[in-house]
Every structure is written in structure tokens, then in C-alpha cells.
Image (cartoon, helix red, strand yellow):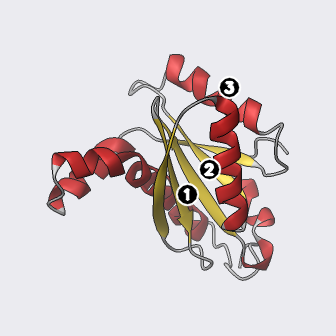
Amino acid sequence: MTVVSIEELPGLLAGGRVLAGLDLGEKTIGVAVSDRGLSFAHPRPVIIRKKFTADAETLLKLLLSEDVAAVVVGLPVNMDGSEGPRVQSTRAFVRNIEKLTPLPFAFWDERLSTVAAERTLIEMDFSRARRKTMIDSAAAAFILQGVLDRLHRLGVDPGTGSPE
């Protein structure tokens, strides 16, 4: 499909379908999926990046199995709001993968999502090694939870995907 705004997502969520969130790292892709009520983001195991074709195939299989209606991708803008090389590579990933699927994609400012995820995992007393394996999916859950909270502020009815 194409890239849509967060405000356009409610119209795509009818029928109890879910949203996915992605945190694109250099070595892994963090994935989270919402519940059908669009209230909570649940981390999924990270996808270890290899080549784009393999990464896309693994990701698209996961999205299909979870009945995902749309995908929110964390956009790693700089703290001053400017866009650097990581934003360019994120946009390029979406441009390439959207050719392989009818799913719509939306971007969400992910500033500090990894920091928040790291703090949460530390508070949960995860070891440094365990945090390393979970950080990208935890960050994806923070990204997705931000979108879910935004949708609730917009008054989205989870049953129909449209404003209440």
C-alpha cells in the first residue's frame, strides 16, 4: 500500500485486526503486536537481520500470522528534530518492503524509546546479556504503545477501528 498518517489508522483497523510496531536496528528488528482491543503492545522475539530479502520474508510471515492491519515504524529522528542517516535508512526499508505487501505503514517519532525500554528492563532486574537480546522488541513495544495511546485519545473504537 503506502505510508499513512497515524490519524488514518483507525479506518484500517476494522474487524478486530491488530497493529504491529517495529524498531529497526542495524543488527535486529524489534517487533511488537497489539492486542485486539488496541490497548496493549506485546513484544515478540527480535528478527536477526541478514539480508533485506530474508528479513522481509521473516517479517511479513510474522505480520500475516498475527493478522496485522497496519505497521507502525519507529522513526529515529535526532533530539533536535532533524533527520540523519538512520532516518534515511528507515524510510528506505519501508519503501522497499511496501512493494512486497499491501499493508500500510505509518511512522512514529521514536526519540527515547530505546532509553525508556532499557530503563524498564533494568527496573525488572534483567541481566545486561538478557537486556541485549530484548531491547529492540521492548523499544518496538514502547513505540507501538505510544501509537495505541494516541488512538485512544482520538477516541478509536477497537471493535470497528473508527472514532467512537
Give the residue at mark 2: 72
Q: Is residue 5 visible?
A: no
Which residue is pictured at 14% across the width and 60% down the height?
A: 125
How busy is the neighbourhood of tag 3: few (under 14 within 10 Å), some, or many (20 plus)? few
**CB-based contact (under 8 Å), mark 2 and mark 3:** no
Going from N to C along the chain, the mark reached first, 2 or 3, is: 2
Which residue is pictured at 57% across the width and 75% down the height?
A: 35
| Residue 99 appears left or right of 29 | right
**CB-based contact (under 8 Å), mark 1 and mark 2:** yes
* Secondary structure found at label 3: helix
Amino acid type, residue under disc 1 in the picture: Val
Q: Is residue 120 visible?
A: yes
Gap between marks 2 and 3, in whole Å?
15 Å
Gap between marks 1 and 3, in whole Å?
22 Å
Residue 80 position, x and y percent, is 41, 24
Residue 82 position, x and y percent, is 49, 21
Amino acid type, residue under disc 3 in the picture: Ala
Disc 1 versus disc 3: nearer the observer = 3
Which residue is pictured at 73% across the width and 61% down the height?
A: 64
Whether residue 124 is situated above or below residue 92 in the rendered picture: below
| Residue 44 appears left or right of 133 | right
Amino acid type, residue under disc 2 in the picture: Val
Disc 1 versus disc 2: nearer the observer = 2
The tag on residue 147 is 1
How busy is the neighbourhood of tag 1: few (under 14 within 10 Å), some, or many (20 plus)? many
The tag on residue 136 is none
Gap between marks 1 and 2, in whole Å?
8 Å
The tag on residue 92 is 3
* Secondary structure found at label 2: strand
Which residue is pictured at 47% across the width and 67% down the height?
A: 42
Extreme-top residue of the structure: 85
Q: Examine the image and state in which quarter residue 126 appears.
A: bottom left
